[in-house]
Amino acid sequence: MPHASPIRSSRVGEVTCVTFTEGRITDEMVIHQIGQEVLKLVDADAQPKVLLDFSGVEHLSSAALGVLISVNNRVKSRAGQLRLCSISKQIFEVFHITRLDKLFQIHATAEQAKQSLA
């Protein structure tokens, strides 16, 4: 029986908004599934504008960071834009330590992230 999707996506104008249904993104299978599903959404647009909303996510494994980097690379290869928002302090700390806060455009709220995608 297939697992319920670990993400929910919606469309706001040209922007694909993705939220996560799991508070802890640490399971290899779940991380793999998130990667597959988000990449499918990226590939659906010629120039994707993707917003990953982390509200409700308390824990992210390093494998999940790897998937985010893959998604970022795919978006860039399609001349698209990727934004992250609503990242908790603990998770932001990981982004900061790994210097991923320099790679990703991170916004406090989904609203600010959407505006930056104009």
Image (cartoon, helix red, strand yellow):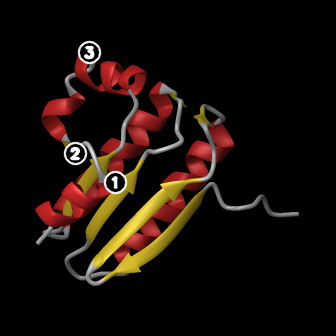
The residue at the point 37 percent across, 37 percent down is 87
The structure residue drawn at horizontal position 52% and vertical position 64%, both measured from the top left corner, is 37
Q: Which residue is drawn at 40% across and 30% down?
A: 88
Residue occupied by mark 1? 71
Query: For the residue marked with disc 3, what is the amino acid?
Result: Ile
In percent of width and height, residue 46 lies at 23, 82
Amino acid type of the residue tagged 2 in the rendering: His
* Relative image position of residue 32 (x, y in whole percent): 57, 48
Residue at the (46%, 75%) spot, across then down: 10
Q: Which of 67 and 83 is in front in this view?
A: 83
Q: Name the residue nearer the viewer: 81 or 76.
A: 81
Within 10 angstroms of label 1, few (less than 14), some, or many (20 or more) residues? many
Q: Which mark is residue 97?
A: 3
Q: In which quarter of the image is the N terminus?
A: bottom right
Residue 50 marker: none
Residue 116, position in %: x, y?
A: 12, 61
Q: Which mark is residue 107?
A: 2
How many residues crowd mark 2 within 10 Å: few (<14), some (14–19), many (20+)?
Answer: some
The residue most toward the top is 97
The image position of residue 66, as x and y in percent, is 39, 37
| Quarter containing the C terminus | bottom left
